[in-house]
Amino acid sequence: MVENRYTLDFEKPIMELEHKIEELKGLTAEEGLDLTEEISSLQSRLKKLEKDILSHLTPWQKVQLARHPNRPKSLDLTELIFDDFLILHGDRLYSDDQAIVGGLARIEEEKLVFIGHQKGKSIKENLVRNFGMAHPEGYRKAQRLMNLAEKFNRPVLTFIDTPGAYPGIEAEERGQAEAIAANLERMSQLRVPILAIIIGEGGSGGALGIGVGDKVLMLENAIYSVISPEGCAAILWKNQEKVEEAARALRLTPPDLLNLKLIDETIPEPVGGAHRNVEQTALNIKKAIIKHLKELKRLSPEQLVKKRYEKYRQMGEFRRG
């Protein structure tokens, strides 16, 4: 349990009960009292409460979990998943975008190239990381890493966690749309396996810029959408009170995305979300990475490109009613 952490409204009853349990455990240690029965009773209540609250989260509540300030960021997870990681900097054209990190990594005996969005843990760090919203140089850095992966025949692993690409004037002046489009084209043709994992927010073109994969996975409480619920509510209803309705309509949670065949698998999170047990979250992701890379490496470069093309051509089917 993380102390003094940010708490969402629907988490508060759970947190209060956890604090009561910790208080009783403290009394047991300090006063030598036997409170085993009381603690056991509260723990049973806690499990039931967690199940009642966390098993019935609305899409908007899942949006809040995906954005939770204590949710593990890309570098938190890589520290636990990778056995070696050499970070590489810069796009060799303009600068080093801190909203995207990447480099050469190793998981057990598997060597790969990693690319991921990086949010900050504090206001100061978020200003440096631009809240995970990449500029064009971030996407060009990502493409440089993709080219390295193909050159050295290493799989590409991406972690997606962004509200979207940075929409500022300076980003547009430096070719934001072109940089993302170039990445979409490059990833569609890359002759090595690509595994993309949405670990938090998967926002619009900002997510797609490193998100064209042979397999696209999502953490259980992550979201993936063409627009944020707030943006959708503003455009459709011009009313921010409609964000919950917008979140439902956008079908941005893993069950809906699996049904629409926009993702391939959901990675389970610990009860209450990834921020409740970062180590277990990282272990779950690591198992999924090893499993899918093993499967993808059986395919030839020609098969990878062909199957990737077919995968994305099949998206967006609809029926006339």
Image (cartoon, rainbow, N blue to C red):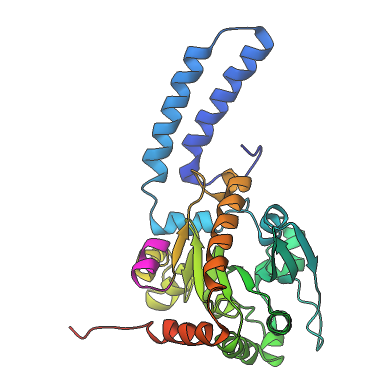
Left or right: residue 108 versus residue 304 is right
Is residue 6 in view?
A: no
The number of numbered badges drawn on the structure is: 0
- Image quadrant for the N terminus? top right
Foreground residue, 224 or 153? 153
- Residue 22: give x, y in percent of width and height: 59, 24
Foreground residue, 243 or 315? 315
**Residue closest to the far left:** 321
From what the image shows, is residue 40 above or below residue 107?
Answer: above
- Residue 272: give x, y in percent of width and height: 50, 44
Q: Quadrant of residue 92?
A: bottom right
- Image quadrant for the C terminus? bottom left
Does the magenta run of residues contain 141? no
- Residue 273: give x, y in percent of width and height: 52, 48
The residue lying at 48 percent from left, 87 percent from top is 306
Q: Main secondary structure of the magenta part?
A: helix
Q: Which contiguous range is marked in magenta?
A: 253-262
Q: Quadrant of residue 47?
A: top left
Does the magenta run of residues contain 258? yes
Foreground residue, 27 or 74? 74
From what the image shows, is residue 175 above or below residue 27?
Answer: below
The residue lying at 36 percent from left, 39 percent from top is 52
Is residue 261 in view?
A: yes
Left or right: residue 34 versus residue 103 is left
- Residue 186: give x, y in percent of width and height: 61, 88
Left or right: residue 41 versus residue 126 is left
The residue lying at 50 percent from left, 56 percent from top is 64
Foreground residue, 297 or 139? 297
